[in-house]
Amino acid sequence: MQTDRDESLAALSWLIQAGADEAIGDVVRNRTAAPRPAPVPAQTAAARPAPRAPAPVGDGGLMSNDAALASARTLAGAATTLDELRAALAAFDGCPLKQTAMNLVFADGNPQAKVMVIGEGPGAEEDRQGLPFVGVSGQLLDRMLACIGLDRTTAYITNVLFWRPPGNRTPTASEIAACLPFVERHIELIDPDYLLFVGGISAKTLLGRSEGILKLRGRWAHYQHVGLARPIPAMASLHPAYLLRQPAQKRLAWRDLLALKAAMQSGKDPLLAT
Ligand code: URA
């Protein structure tokens, strides 16, 4: 009896170490197995609907990185509204994180806001609720925004990843790349006056830089993309989860927020203002 218990506890501990720290369903599913062919309905080949997305390639039904990127670009590029973009993400199978997440975490806040805040990716609470920044670091983000007079009615909040990495591990380059076309389209559709990138992953990905966040934070940069009418001034700052671990660094984040507030009050692009 004791041995059964010990074995179960050891198996549970192994799963948690591997990042499987949430039960996402009651039925066990082998997510690495090749998908079973769908039953073919009794109709002629000519009457069958055309396939929607590029065919999966590679082992176990997973898409290759190239196929994932092509699918992401096609689906994101075709979205002309936020609802369409969310639906496109829900239909997208090129990011493996979707397999282990409970929910798609798209965005929260006001799509008409002047400021778009972009974080890294959902944690456990965000995954449960399907909303960004609703856990402990989200509560700190809310307090940080409140310090400069913003809240979820005057800011729009999202992430560079739309699904939670298991166990909150660091996302891989290919997971970030698969989500990027959706993030770029998201920014085009919101078309904010200012961007606030919180954390190194968001700042490095969207500014195309390799330096760490302590180098990138506190300076204005232009976020540019082909679909935008103009470059958008972007401020990189520290992630609230980092600030919870390193409270002394809050003074740096405070400076960044004050710079954002001053730019918003001026209504100007700080990189162009004389
Ligand atoms: N951290 C993030 O970067 N985003 C969230 O939504 C939650 C925590």
Image: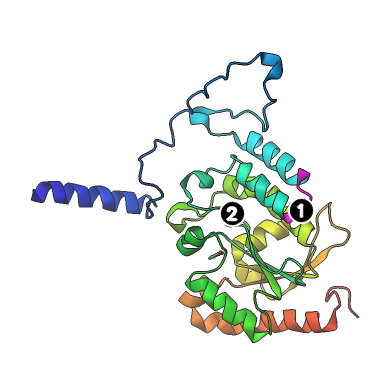
Q: Is mark 2 within 8 Å of ligand 1?
A: no
Residue kind at label 2, given as amino acid type: Phe
Residue kind at label 1, given as amino acid type: Thr
> What residue lies at 68% left-to-right and 84% top-to-bottom?
148
> What residue lies at 48% left-to-right and 73% top-to-bottom?
136
Q: Quadrant of residue 252?
A: bottom right
> If the image is split into quadrants, where does the C terminus sit?
bottom right
Report crowding for label 1: few under 14, some 14 to 19, many 20 or more residues within 10 A (C-alpha): few
- Residue 63 in view of the camera: yes
Work out whether 238 lies above or below 21: below
Image mark for residue 81: 1
Image mark for residue 90: none
* Residue 112 screen position, x and y as percent: 77, 68
* Residue 56 screen position, x and y as percent: 59, 30
> What residue lies at 67% left-to-right and 83% top-to-bottom?
255
Q: Which residues are magenta?
A: 78-82
* Residue 249 screen position, x and y as percent: 55, 80
- Residue depth check, mark 1 versus mark 2: number of the one nearer the observer: 1
Q: Which residue is mark 2?
A: 162
Secondary structure state at the residue bearing disc 1: loop
Q: Quadrant of residue 152?
A: bottom right
Q: Residue furthest top?
A: 44
* Residue 217 screen position, x and y as percent: 66, 72
